[in-house]
Structures are given as structure tokens and as C-alpha cells.
Amino acid sequence: MKGVWEFSGHLMQKELQTDISRLLDEARQFARQGKREKAYQSSLKATSVAPDVPLAWYLRAQTAPSPEEQLMCLSRAYSLNPAFPEAKNELRTAVQALLKQEPFLAYVQETEEFYQVRSGLDLLINIPKNRTFEKPYLQRAPGPAKPAFRWLSISLLALFLGGVGAVLLAPFTAFQVLRLQAASPSRGDRTRLWIVFILSVIIWLAAIPIGWLLLIRFYPG
Amino acid sequence: MLLRALYLSAIWFALSLFATLIMGSRLRRSDTTLSLLWLAGMILVGNLIALLTFGRILEIFGLALTAFVFGLFWIARFRDWNAAGQVTWTMTLMTTGLFIIYTFLLTAFSPLNPLSFIFALLFFFLEAITLLLALAHMHESLDVVCRMRWHRLLDKLEPVPDYQPMVSLQVPAYNEPVEVVQKTLNSLAGLNYQNYEVLVVDNNTPLEETWRPLEEICRKLGPNFHCLHLDKWPGYKSGALNFAVTQTDPRAEIIGIIDSDYQVDPDFLRELVPAFADPQVAFVQTPQDYSDFKGDIFSESTYRGYKYFFEVSMPSRNERNAIIFAGTMGLIRKSVLEEIGGWDEWCITEDAEASLRILKLGYQSLYINRPFGSGLMPFNFEGLKKQRFRWCFGGIQILKKHWEALMPWAHWVDPDNKLTLAQRYYYLVGGLGWFSDVFNLLFALFLVLGAVFSIFSSPVQIRPLTNTILVIPTVFLSLHILRFLWVLRNRLRVSLGMAAATMYNFFSLGWAVTLACIQGLVQREGVFLRTPKSKTSSRTWHAIHVTKWETAISLVCILTGLLAFGANQNWRTFSLCVLLIWQGSLYFAAPIYSLLSLGREAALGAHVTEQGKPVMEQRAARWVVAASMLLMAAFSLITFLPSPTELPGYARFLPVDVSPTGLAGRERESASPPTATITVESANCRARPRGNARVVTILYSRQQVEIVGRNADLINPWWHVKIPNRSGRCWLWGMTARMTGNVEEIPVIE
């Protein structure tokens, strides 16, 4: 029974794809022949049958009767496939035309790829960012070396506060480094950890005389 | 030996600096022979003074040789500087190094109880870091005034034929008066450049009637002017600028940022765009200038303060391709901005932050030292204080985000980090430099504590106030002030009075900078300073009210200084009083400038950006006061711990103290019998001149005893003294007392 359902589902899918391809071809041909209305109707049908196909939205935008609808369709095409260069370029031109009319844009949300804004004419538009994405500072996950750095900072503070604490904490930092070394996936982190190791040794070496200077004050004789 | 080396080095430092102040900018030659002669001359004059005062020929010769070799290294290293700069730098470095060694030895071997020692150690680290920051300032000053050969400094670029790429000029605006923005846009409409567009990006201005007229202005100015209003937009100015990049013409290759209150020179683009013909150049910066600075001391000193950065710091940074992109009046390559991922919306000085990321990729930057426009300064001291808070806070954010990229090992951790050593140095020092004001406040606190303990004759001490500790820092302070005034006069071409006013203008913002540093460390996101609100409508009262914390700090400093001197009149409390009055005067400049800015308030001034959540100055200041109280309480705990009752063995390593009169050789003429004044809390007076001999009596801090004899060893002296208030004599170790009188007249007792 399951096999029958799968087979019929597969058939319907294939039929649907044929339908969409036919509608898209029709829309293209009508547009080429200058029959805008018919081209629009075909692409309209294509977007209602397959709202997830970017090309359908792009073709509908080509023949859309109003700039608002054109903008909406391009925005949809772009959000479905941000690597759709024609949609991206035309979207930019359409947004600029819109902004000439009404410069108001309200922020809705954003992704790594685009901003989603609401225009003064109440249209929801996706605007490509066209740049590399740098993870925001506050959202960055701490690296594997972070615990070692934390211990290093505490050791340094202990060095400033008389050195005795650093005599104990610096070896602990070094131990943390050795423990974390095994789990560090990247070369950068491993180097970072070796640097923490070297710094903890330096702190330890400095802490010995400073700690001694503190301790002798408990036994001035 | 160490102490004499320190004093001799300080003499060389003072001599070379004075010579530089007089001749530094006039000596227009960079010549190795001249440098060597100059170095030798300075050393010889210093040696002569040393010989006439505390002279020991062999020691002086050894030190002179060391200084000469050290000088040779710096002459070779800074070939582009003139002789005056090279020698002054050598001597500053040498004196600073020797003083740090001296203070470490003093901290390490003074007879202190454990808690005192911990405070002394903290104080030592604080002092060492401050001295290193002062060195960085000295380097920057000498680098610009004594530099004879500039490799990268330009004030004009050669035009590149047929190179006219499209430029997108972006004008961010928030709640700006229309007439101010209109002037800016009109100036942009008059640019002598064919291929550009202007994009006005208004972000989050709440009232439509404020931003809507901008649309009409842009429409009138032509098709290359566009206007955009962004509502409920995150990321403040950088968020808006990031969006603006998406709306620039795709043909645009360069982006320019122009503040909405700037009047731009018609040649701005024509003169600067040729820099981008070199594909390695990622951004170009020009000085920011202001037109509304004449008429009162506040405005003019503020203006000169801004100029300092563009006339001193930027040229020096530019020589090492380490400038910062200061936002307005700068151009940046669009492809590079897209490559780095746009402006950082977390950092409130996004322009400077972006420049660091660009330089990390190995691109070039260029500073053209010629202003191409002028803007408006904050219209009162309150505005200036908020602006400085923002800049400092942003600087600390950059340091927090990029500290690892600035470390010496950065290349090993991240091979893609192409920052050179010099670039890392400038960015690191630029960030850490803000902490000078925090250290200044801490020093003021330490001085106030010293004065309070002196008033109540409390035995608490964190470090013995040796003569050297009083003399050398005063010498440092005076010389660095002179150096600062000299640079201001030299580079900004102002009178001595205006240079002093500018210096005080800098210092008057120390409190705001301190708060920004602390907030920058503890706050995760961007904040702005909200100054205290006054309930009265009096402008004068409001001007005083917004600087009430600075006023309070200055009054505390001045009053405790005067009281300490009044309660116990000697030259030590006098020195303490002078230092406290100096510190107080720095903070007292704030209310003075705030009052002086009253005259300016009527005029139109720049709008100071307030982005992020507000930080109430009141609340932040209370935390600082609480921390100070805690520190004071911790200090008081010192009294509950026992102090050494007899001179500990480790004190034998203490550097011998020499009085200034002793150094000057004046005591040779003294007719009074030689005396020893105890400089430690308590000192054992022994039966024989040995550390393990029987203790006859204990002498206490500041007690004065007559010297009747000495041992033969002048390097490790023991004084045979009369026991005060009773008969008998005992041996006092020289390291624990200051000797007054002529040592050669004291008979040696075998």
C-alpha cells in the first residue's frame, strides 16, 4: 500500500513539475511576443501552483502591472534564491525607484544575506546585503583557549597582588593548557594555547621572587 | 651606584629635552656625525654637572659609556630624526628604565608589613605602566617635531589622468536641524567632480517634520542626490551606514562619509580620489576641521585639542601605515568595506574599528594633511564631555575586540593577520592611552591618602617617601608637561597661553575618560553618558552642576594637600601639597571650562551622538567613590598588621637615598654637625656595624641623630650616632637614614 502511495506521489510530483515548466515556458514566450497580459497570467498561475520556485516570481515581476507588485515578486524571488543575479540586480533598481517615491523604510528583520524592511507603502521587501558576513562580536562563541586565558588573567592578577597566588596558579594554568591542547581542533588555537603556556611559565618565574619578597615580610627576622 | 646613575641620567634627560625645546624644531638636518656630536656633547655637559656635584669619575665614565652606546643604537634606529630627537629619546628611555628599576628595588626591600608590600607592589605596577605610556607620548611628540624625512606624508596628490571612478558620499543624520544638513548638502552639490552621488541616510529621527524636508532638499539638488529614512533601525549610525551601502550605485567604487554638519571644500573628491588609483589603498583620511572656534578660550582650546590628533598623532601613525579612519572627511574603497563585512554595529566608533580590520588584511591607508571642510564642535562643555566619553568608550571596545590581534604573537595565532609591528603598537598604545586618565585619578587617590595619613600622623605607609621618590617623579612630570606644551606650540602654532589652555582642556576631560574606560570594560554593549540633570533653569548653575564630580575631586585634592602641609610643615608635605594642587587643578579645569562655554551656548553647535543605553554619571561616579572608600579601608587595615620592629635583613638591598642638597654638593659648605634622619618606620641601632650585632636601641621614622663616626665603606655605610635623650652611642645602618652634612668630615672608626 505504501509503495502505491509513493508511486502516485511521485507521479503527481512529476506532473506538477511538467505543469510548472509549461507555465514558465508559456510566460517566457508570451513575454517575448510582447503579450504582457498573457505572460503575466501564466506566471501568476506558476507562482500560485509553485510558490517556492524563484524563477516563477522573477517572470511574474517582469510583467507585473504595478511597481509595487514587481517589487514584491523580485523580493520573493531573491529571498528564495539569494544567488539569483538577475533578481538581485532588478530588485536594487526597483527599490531605488520606490525610494524616489517614498524614502521611508522600517526595519523588520535581517539575515546574513538580506534585510527585510517594510516600505512607506506597506510593502515587505528583502534587500540584499552584498557583502561578506562577519559574525557580530557579542554572538561569537568563546574559543577553546578561553578557560586557559581566564586562568592566565587570574595568575597575572595574583602576580600583581604579591606573587604567592601566582606561584600556585601559573602551574595550574599550564596544566589547563596541556589539558585543552588535546581537544583543540585548529592550529590557531593550539598556537594560542602554547603562548598561554609560555606566558604562564614567565608569570611563574616572576612570581617566585615576588612571592618570596612577600613571604619574608611575615618572618622579618 | 643606581641612584647616582638615575640622577645623572635625569640630568642628561633634562639637558637634552631643554635643548630639544629650544632647538628641536630648528635643527633641520638629519646627519649621523651631528647626532654623535650632539650625544657626546649632552653626555659631557651632564658629566660636568655630575663631577661638580656628586662626582665619582669612574662611575661617571662607565655611565657615560653606557649612555653613548645606548644612544648609538637609537641614532641608528631613528635615522629620519634630527640629533635633538634621537638624544632626547635615548635619555628619556634610559631615565625611565632606571627609575623603574629604582622603584622596584625600593618596593621590594623597604621594611614594610605584608599588606603594605602588596599595595606598594600594585603602586609600582601602576607607576611602571604610566611611565611606559608617557614614553609612548614622548615618542609620538619627537616623531613629528624632530622628524626630518617624511616618507608617506602628503598634502596633495598627483592627479591621475582619466581616472574618475564613481564615488558615493553618504551623509548619516539623526535628529539634525534641517538648516545644518541643507548647508552640508549645498556644499556637496558644488563639488568639482563629475562622477558622484550623495545618499542622505536619516536613521530613527522620531519626528517626521524633522526628516521629511531632507527629501525635498535632495529632490531639488538633482538626480544624484538621494534621501532615505530608516525607521526603528538597529545598529545606530553604523547600522544605517551598512544599509546605505546596499543602496549605493553599483558603479560606485569609493564611499565617502560626511557628517551632516560639515561644509565640504569643492576640491575634496578631485584631490583625494587619485589615491585610489593604487589598488592597495583602501582608505584615505583628511583632518577634521571646525569653523566655529574663534571668540572664547573654551572654543579655541577645544579646537586646538582636536587639531592635536590630526597634527601630531595622525602624521606619526601615517608614517607606519597605521592611521585610523576617522569617519567624516574620509574615503574608503567600497569593495574593501564589503570584504570586511561592513561597519561593526556593536562598536560605537565603527570607523576606527573598520580601519583596523582593513589594515589586518594588509591594505594601505593614506593620510593627506590638508583639511577639505569644516564642521561644528559641541556647543558646550557638557557636549564635549559626552563626545569624549563616546570616543574613549569606542576605543576600549576596539581593544576588547581586537586585543589579541595586537599582541606580539598575533602572526603565529592568525597567519592571515597582516598587521605590522608598528601598526599593532600604534593601535595598542592608542587604546591603552585612554587609561592614562584612570591612572591619573588613582595617583590622585594615593596622594590624597598620603595626605590624610600625614594629617593624622598615622604610621601607615606603602612606600618610604625617599628624596628620590619626591624629586624624580616631579622632574618627570615637569619635563613631560614642558614637552606637551612644546608640541602644542610647535605643531599648532599657538601662543604659550593657548597651549596651556589646550593642555588643561585635555585634562579637564579626565573624569569623563575615566568613567568611559571603566564602563568600556564592564559594559557589553554601547552606552552613552548622561550627565546629571539640574532642577534650576539657571544656565550658570547647570554649567557647574554638570561638572560637580570633577569639582568635588579637585576640592578634595587641594584641601587635603593644604591641610597636610599646614599640619606638618616640612619639604616633604610641601611637595605632597604641590602635587595635590597640581592634580586638583586638572579636575578644576572642568567647571572653569564649563562656565567658559556658557558664552558659546547661544551659538549653533554640533549634535553629540547618543547611542546605546544611557550611563548615569551619578551612578557611575558613586561606584568610583565606593571603590575609593574600599581602597581607603583596605589601606587602614595596614595599621592592624604589625610592622617590622627591627630592621629586617633584606633591607640591606635598599638603594641608598641621597638628598637633593647632597647631590648638589651644597652640604660640603654646611657648618653644622652631620646628622642622620631615619627614613624607615623603625631602625635598629646596633652595638657594632653589622646586621647581626646586638640591638642597643630602636630609632623611629623622622628621628634625627648626630653622627660622630662612620665605617670605611661608603657604598654600604654605617653611622656611629649619639643615642638621643640618653647617653651612649650605637651603629645605624646608612640605608635606613638620610645623611646631612659632609661625609668626608666624619671620622672613620675602625
Image (cartoon, coloured by chain):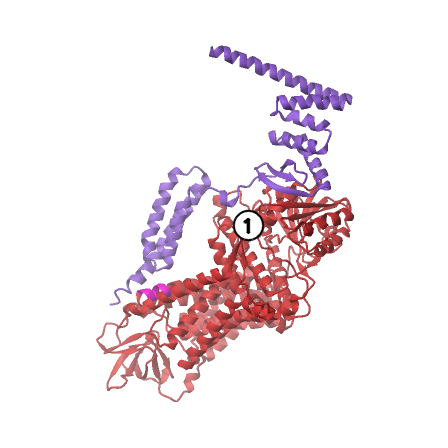
Report the magenta stretch's main SS: helix
Is B116 a magenta residue? yes
Judging from the image, mark 1 belongs to the subunit labelled: B
Left or right of B374, for residue B440? left
Asked if residue B476 can be seen in this view, the reply is no
Q: Position of residue A19 (x, y in %)?
A: 64, 16
Report whether residue B512 is seen. Answer: yes
Q: Residue at x 73, y 31 (%)?
A: A66
Residue B676 position by quadrant: bottom left
Instruction: Confirm whether the magenta stretch covers residue A52.
Output: no
- Quarter location, residue B597: bottom right
Magenta stretch in the rendered image: B114-119
- As drawn, B255 above or below B388: above
B463 relative to A186, above or below: below
Task: Name the residue nearer the viewer: A165 or A9.
Answer: A9
Q: Amino acid at mark 1?
A: Cys
Residue nearest the observer in this picture, B544 or B127: B544
Q: How crowded is the residue under tag 1: few (<14 C-alpha within 10 Å), some, or many (20+)?
A: many
- The total number of labels drawn is 1
Which part of the image, by quadrant, shows the C terminus of chain A? bottom left
- Where does label 1 land, which residue? B347
Please tell me whether mark 1 sits on a helix, a strand or a loop. Answer: loop
Left/right of residue A161 with respect to residue B438 in the rendered view: left
State the purple chain.
A
Name the residue: 58% across, 66% down. Answer: B83
Q: Which chain is red?
A: B
- Measured from the top left, where is residue A71 in percent x and y? 68, 33
Give the side of residue A156 with respect to residue B428, left or right: left
B438 or B274, nearer to the observer: B438
Find the residue positioned furthest to the left: B694
Nearest to the observer: residue B244 or residue B464: B244
